[in-house]
Image (spheres, rainbow, N blue to C red):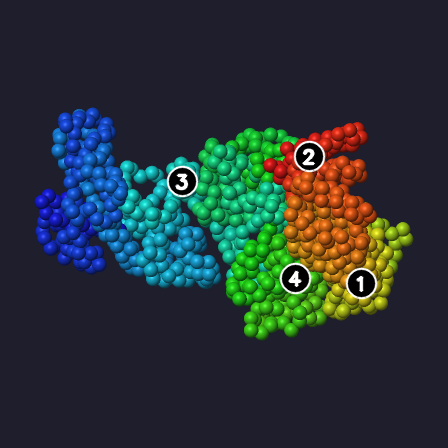
Amino acid sequence: MELEALICPAAKKVCAPIIFGTNAKMVQDVFRAYLTEVGDVSLDRLMEVSPVLGKECRRLALATKPGLCHYSGTEPAFVKPGETKTLRAIASMHHEMLGGTGQYLIESLPEEDQKKGWTLIPEIKDWRKRWCRSFPVMVQNLTPTEIRIDRHQKIGVIHLLDQVSSIMSMSRDAECLHQVKASRLKLTDWLENNPLVVLRWLHADGILPQDKYFFLLDRNPQRNQVISLLETVTQDAEICKAFVHVLQQVQEYYCPDLHNWLKDNFPVYIKESTGPMEKEKTSRRSALGWFKKKITKENTYKCNPKGQKRNSITTSHLKESLRNHKHSLLKQNVKVQGNIGTSCTSCEIFEIQYTELFITDEDQNEAPNQHEYFTLANRRARIYEHNKHKKIKLTDLISPNNPECREPRKVLITGIAGIGKSFAVRRMMHEWAMGMAFKNVSCAMNFALRELNLIEGPVSFLDLVTRNHIHLQGVLEELCKDPTDLLVILDGLDEFKHPINKGKKVDTITERVPIQDLVYSLINGTLLSRAFVVVTSRPHTTTSLVMFDRKVVILGFDEKHVNNFCLRFFRNSELSEKVYQYIMQNDNLSGLSFIPLYCFIICTALKGFFSNISEPCSTGKPPQTMTEVYSCYLCTTMHHRTNKETSKTNNTEQESIVLCTEATLAEMKGILCQLGKLAYYSLLNNKILFYGEDLKRFGFDPSQLPDSFMNRIFVHVEGKGPTEMFSFFHMTIQEYFAALHCVICMSPDPKELIQCLDLWCFGNHPQEPVQSQLLSSSMKIITAKQWENLEIFSRFFMGILSNRIEGKLKGLVDCLSADILGPLAKWFKGKIKYAVNRRLLNLLHCLRELQRNTVVEEVAPDIDEVNLFKVILNPADCATLCYVLQHSTTRLKILNLGYTNIGMQGLRRLQPLLHRCQTLHLRYNSLGKDAAIMEADVLKSSTCQVKCLLMCGNHIGSEGVQHLWEALSSNQTLEELYVDITGITDSGLDNLLPCLTKNTTLRLLTIVGNNLSERSKQLLVTVQRQKPTLKILSSFLSDMGLLQAYLDWVQDLKEDPQQMESAKNADALRNVLAELGKEDPGKKDKDLIERIEKLKFEISRILQTSPVAQ
């Protein structure tokens, strides 16, 4: 029952607030009795209805008296029919009204308005600073004839707001709580079919904290969720009020009985719904309703954010279809498929498992020349604070960047496999169906493009929607009359087998055309031209990007997201924190964890080692390498499967799982071998989707597939109806099984191993291939460039090969003799000595996954040069490099890490190696002062062998370079030091002269491109004069070779624009341009002058055209 307060106007006597409920006859009787001055009868009756309110009314009865409002004009006022006129009024209030808040409501009462035919428009007056006895008011004529208002005529009453609002607040809280408690059983019946909507809205409003929200979602069956929720909301009146408010906003998701209950008991809480299920607009509200909204403005729960577009869906059939469509979408998204029993059961709940993603603007300058995992790692490595990348919320994808911009109608979302594209699409549909986001969309629909591949023959958009979203059948034509508020999502453009850069343009939803023309027209905008179209794809789609208004990339998780995912996965803060810390402290695992699916696999693999907080669950060491993680994941899922099939329920969760037992592997051998064969040959052929017939050709029954490795999907195939198809859970799962297949098939002959490695890692076909089914079949498929997409596979192969040598694959295949490690080490030595860039890095990772010290100790001493120039490295890469090179004590001639973006985190991983490097390239790595301090410690070391140190383009600053000068006072190895464009100012040279005076080895110092005054440059001249063996380059005019080096650098930036993101190159270019402006070539060589002018021009051009420089 909703109760409101009215002030009863009574002349010449004190009157009390009256409780009035439009739906309760008893309370209406009380109101009428009080108006007829029956005396205490009204309060007695009120005490029967609500003792709390009755007592409060009695308390205020002698203190509450309205003021009066009179017309104060000198002449009568005339108001024409329908006219609203401003008049001058005067207030008359008793002294009790001059306290309180100082805010007053001026209005005329409805019963008086009906008699006199005009009304005073309600208005709040704020007289907290100064009371105004005379003030303007607005009067509206409600009659068809002119009215007259005489001087001093009463035109309204004045209420002190704090006297009224206290009664209203009390009535709202007490009666709301009473009604919810009384109707708990009914509410349970009404909400149990779909409690998620109410729970999510309460969580979004901050009423249910995350732990309580997850706890309720975990309850089964759903009726228990509602029972627990009602127990919670009936403990507190404020929470109960919020609960009722949420019910009003989401009532369209529930049965008519709930609608009627809300209407009968809470009529003044009825608010218009937002989004596609919007109710018909109500008629003009009464002054009392307006007043209620005014005085409770601060506590009002917003239903429709300001400025959001409302939809005008009014037909009951359309409403019902959209309601069913939403219900269907929510039902589909209850559980996450593909991880049955491999984790805490709550992690299978979509609402719990989904973790926010890091989404930012796409970088269209990436080149598709490597495995997509490495491309993404490179992209992430370039994200630093100074880049100021804008993080974009998933729910803002179709919203303008600012109010002045138009809404993006065509949006492209890119991201590698497993990064969460399809999950994000599900989230978008889920959020819309829940009413939490995309409120400018009346209807959303999504399509998986790999399923559309199976459509043969002409099809219309109407047919397509009917097949995929049955509840929209019959209303689509009405929806498409104005597609402005339609959202169409096309998931997996990279999986669509048809080219869509050109095609027939379709402009009607009923025209039947080949499926590629339909998709082309949707993306190109000829079909549903004003609709929102969101497309997802793996990177480097061949589709023209011009047609997209917004292009974004999903970069996965950052550290906060990983922490949040662990909490959602384990649902125990102490346990999740231990796992999270283990992940972050292991470079291999943390380097993988930013990909959501990898994060899930890691948590699944670690679960057996951390589940018992007081005592470890497993006696073995937790996995450290990528292969170990996937092996543990494989064993965990197989363990669950075999336990489930044999009905072993007592030890499923408690039994320690380190590696699969021989018995388990033997039992699963048939499935694993056939899965491996399928994975390998489909990997070589770039095939990701399989029919059941495809699986049967590889020798096993599709019904025996573990759901944790393969996804089952049903797609509509022309002429066949719904058809079951399969794909690997993730690309890395496919790569792992492919590697497992190759290890199982590998013979003890080392020649076969070496020739296969040449083929996989370098694309080299052997001239005299050995007799091997694996090798011969692979040679028919693998091309010279295909090795770039087999890097992850080759790393898995090394890790699983090591497992076979150790006997960990017994049950699947016999052990391999450790004698094979000798030829393997020889192969590594021959390849790694001359490998550079990505090939070198992949070989290092293969050694890391192999985990055989005898091999690494034999290979590492032969590595005397490491060239990873422009290979973007993450901390895991740096840790792998350190792991291999620490097995040797020999001197490194060159360690070239220029433009690798290792940052300080990566440099720390390499610190144990730095003193052994004769030439150390650290150019443009987003390093700062701390890096200079670390390098200074290296130079001070008695074991330092560094002769040439390049720190160009790192912002070490004046403080950082002072540490380097200090180190040079004792160092006796360094001959060349490059500190160009490092942010050095005059203060950076304060200790230069005394430190270099003690140094006897330095021969070259380049310090151009820094912000040095003429005084500092003269100091450098003085130093060089005192040390004639030292050459100092502080000006671009001092060396033609230096000037050419900067021209080459600028040319590199033009050819590889992503470098503008990878370091502070925009700032560096500005510094160089400023220094060039100070140079006075005078009568220098003409060629020198031309090069200076060219350098100025090219730098200015880059700064003008690069978005990063803006």
Q: CA distance from mark 3 to mark 1?
A: 66 Å
> Residue under circle 3?
306
Earlier in the chain: of badge 2 and badge 3, it is 3
Q: Amino acid at mark 3?
A: Lys
What residue appears at the point 51 percent right and 43 percent down from the top-left corner? 396
Q: Nearer the viewer, mark 3 or mark 1?
A: 1
Residue 751 placement, left or right of 525: right
> Residue under circle 4?
586
Crowd band around label 2 with a 10 angstrom C-alpha radius: few (<14), some (14–19), many (20+): few
Q: CA distance from mark 3 to mark 4?
A: 47 Å
Q: CA distance from mark 2 to mark 3?
A: 54 Å
Q: Position of residue 124 (x, y in %)?
A: 26, 40
378 or 430, nearer to the observer:
378
Tally of numbered tags: 4
775 or 939, nearer to the observer:
939
| 624 w.r.t. 1011: above or below | below
Q: Position of residue 248 (x, y in %)?
A: 35, 49
Crowd band around label 1 with a 10 angstrom C-alpha radius: few (<14), some (14–19), many (20+): some
Q: Amino acid at mark 4?
A: Asn
Earlier in the chain: of badge 4 and badge 1, it is 4
> Residue under circle 1?
888
Earlier in the chain: of badge 3 and badge 4, it is 3
292 or 1037, nearer to the observer:
1037
Earlier in the chain: of badge 4 and badge 2, it is 4
